[in-house]
Image: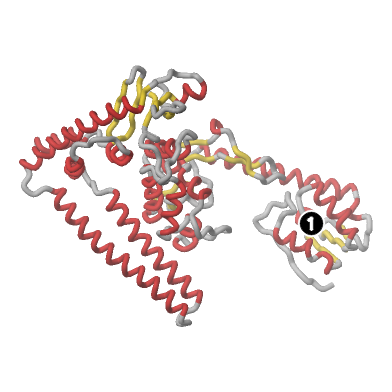
């Protein structure tokens, strides 16, 4: 007897025949006359599939079948594959797989409830804690990408525009980042950002510091398709790890991007109040409406419009604009007066020093950006001129793109977060001066949320709650 080929399927369940090497064996079956297995469980642990294979497929192609430990040889004993003993062994093999599957799932469920992360890799933006494989810590570089994406969403940029921005700036996708910079293998590598990848990231509540597991489960030990689990059955562990995204910001982004009432304009931007208006009584998002043949815009409580629960909390856009405009101008005036007092009491301020340092760093980053862009162009030219191979091109391209992305992300952080402390915030807000109208940029700059009560009641929650008190304390010291 000559062994032509050996097939093995480590890491695959025997309850299915959809295993790579098994399928390869089926394709090769017409070129072979004998199949040998150690025992019947190696063929499979699905009673019906194994029975069909031994009784129909093997006989159809006149294949000799040998199961060494089970004393089965269809050539020496033609009826050995049809005995009661074989049927019972196949049933026992399936029962064993079912029992093991149940025990594993129970073990995983207990582990999840104990706050242990059981995924193979940590969510993008994190790495597994070297001291505890069930926990994870923030990864400095990839977490910057996550923060950048949430900032864009918070500014009202549509998902399509975010994807375009990421791809144009050659920002690594999660799978590409793992492959190139974490040395982790992935079966599917996405070179470009798409809606599926972006939505998975933006909807991932793990970024708030809460561990969410058990969103999907398998139907059974033989059916490996994943099905969704109701939200009230998810396993949630609060404050499991350090957050990358503040929970309020996360919820605001969900409201902006995934609220069915949210609409983008022709420029790919969201309406000025999208994601900011909340009902004072039920905390639902306020829904925008417009009467037919009219320019009048008004808002209702989302829970009221959907289920007739809560109350209307009706307010018109004109009334809201007027209240928000007056309140913001008062806030800017208060901050400006405070800035004057600070300027009189401080000759050389710390925030001027910090601002100057930031400008120097931006100049350095600009030079680094130009350097890596030039290196990328150089290696492309070298490849065209047959100076370097395709492998070398890919190697250097990945390296330079990673370094370039780090520079671009740091530049964005400096440009989008020019305020490093309360004193500098005061100075920046004072520069705004009196405003004449409300747009999304000013709302995004100053406001955390707008709470609507019955009877046109409006409470504006500013982002910098302790700004005034902290500044006064600074002056007193």
Near mark 1 (Cα within 10 A), the count class, few <14, some 14-19 or many ≥20, is some
Question: Residue 40: where, in percent of width, then height?
Answer: 80, 54
Q: Of 186 and 162, which appears nearest the observer? A: 162
Q: How is the image coloured?
A: secondary structure
- Whether residue 393 sits left or right of residue 61 in the image: it is left
Q: Of 293 and 223, which appears nearest the observer? A: 293
Q: Of 326 and 457, which appears nearest the observer? A: 326
468 to 388, vertically: above or below: above
Q: Secondary structure at mark 1?
A: loop
Quadrant into which the N terminus falls: bottom right
291 to 208, vertically: above or below: above
- Whether residue 38 sits left or right of residue 465 in the image: it is right
Q: What residue is shown at x 38% (from left), y 47% (from top)? A: 152
Question: Residue 21: where, in percent of width, then height?
Answer: 72, 61
Q: Of 62 and 441, which appears nearest the observer? A: 441
Q: Residue furthest front?
A: 293
- Whether residue 68 sits left or right of residue 229 in the image: it is right
Let me know if residue 296 appears in the view. Answer: yes
Quadrant into which the C terminus falls: top left
Where residue 33 sits, quadrant-wise, is bottom right
Question: Residue 110: where, in percent of width, then height?
Answer: 56, 38
- The residue identified by callout 1 is 39
Count how many numbered circles sit on residues in the image: 1
Let me know if residue 243 appears in the view. Answer: no
Q: What residue is shown at x 21% (from left), y 57% (from top)? A: 359
Q: What residue is shown at x 36% (from left), y 40% (from top)? A: 246
């Amino acid at each position: 007897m000559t062994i032509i080929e050996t097939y093995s399927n480590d890491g695959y369940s025997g309850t299915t025949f959809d295993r790579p090497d098994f399928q390869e064996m089926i394709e090769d079956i017409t070129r072979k006359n004998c199949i040998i297995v150690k025992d019947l469980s190696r063929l499979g642990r699905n009673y019906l599939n194994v029975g069909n294979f031994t009784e129909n497929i093997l006989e159809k192609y006149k294949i000799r079948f040998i199961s060494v430990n089970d004393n089965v040889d269809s050539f020496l004993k033609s009826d050995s594959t049809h005995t009661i003993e074989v049927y019972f062994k196949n049933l026992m093999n399936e029962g064993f797989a079912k029992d093991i599957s149940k025990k594993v799932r129970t073990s995983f469920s207990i582990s999840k409830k104990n706050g242990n992360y059981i995924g193979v890799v940590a969510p993008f933006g994190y790495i597994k804690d070297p001291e505890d494989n069930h926990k994870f810590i923030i990864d400095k570089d990839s977490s910057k990408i996550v923060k950048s994406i949430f900032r864009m969403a918070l500014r009202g940029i549509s998902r399509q525009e975010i994807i375009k921005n990421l791809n144009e700036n050659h920002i690594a996708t999660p799978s590409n980042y793992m492959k190139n910079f974490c040395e982790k293998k992935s079966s599917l590598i996405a070179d470009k950002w798409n809606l599926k990848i972006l939505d998975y990231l933006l909807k991932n509540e793990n970024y708030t510091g809460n561990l969410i597991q058990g969103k999907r489960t398998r139907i059974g030990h033989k059916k490996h398709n994943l099905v969704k689990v109701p939200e009230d059955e998810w396993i949630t562990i609060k404050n499991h790890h350090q957050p990358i995204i503040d929970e309020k910001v996360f919820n605001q982004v969900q409201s902006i991007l995934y609220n069915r009432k949210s609409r983008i304009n022709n420029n790919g931007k969201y309406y000025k109040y999208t994601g900011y208006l909340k009902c004072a009584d039920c905390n639902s998002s306020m829904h925008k409406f417009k009467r037919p043949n009219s320019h009048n815009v008004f808002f209702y409580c989302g829970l009221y419009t959907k289920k007739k629960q809560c109350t209307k909390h009706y307010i018109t856009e004109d009334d809201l604009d007027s209240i928000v405009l007056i309140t913001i101008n008062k806030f800017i005036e208060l901050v400006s007066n405070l800035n004057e007092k600070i300027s009189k009491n401080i000759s050389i301020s710390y925030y001027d020093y910090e601002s100057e340092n930031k400008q120097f760093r931006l100049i350095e980053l600009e030079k680094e950006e130009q350097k890596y862009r030039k290196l990328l162009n150089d290696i492309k030219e070298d490849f065209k001129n047959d100076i370097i191979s395709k492998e070398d091109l890919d190697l250097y391209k990945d390296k330079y793109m990673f370094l370039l992305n780090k520079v671009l992300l740091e530049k964005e952080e400096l440009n989008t977060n020019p305020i490093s402390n309360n004193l500098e915030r005061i100075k920046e807000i004072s520069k705004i001066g009196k405003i004449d109208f409300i747009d999304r940029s000013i709302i995004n700059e100053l406001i955390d949320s707008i709470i609507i009560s019955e009877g046109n009641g409006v409470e504006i929650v500013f982002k910098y709650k302790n700004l005034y008190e902290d500044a006064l304390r600074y002056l007193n010291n």
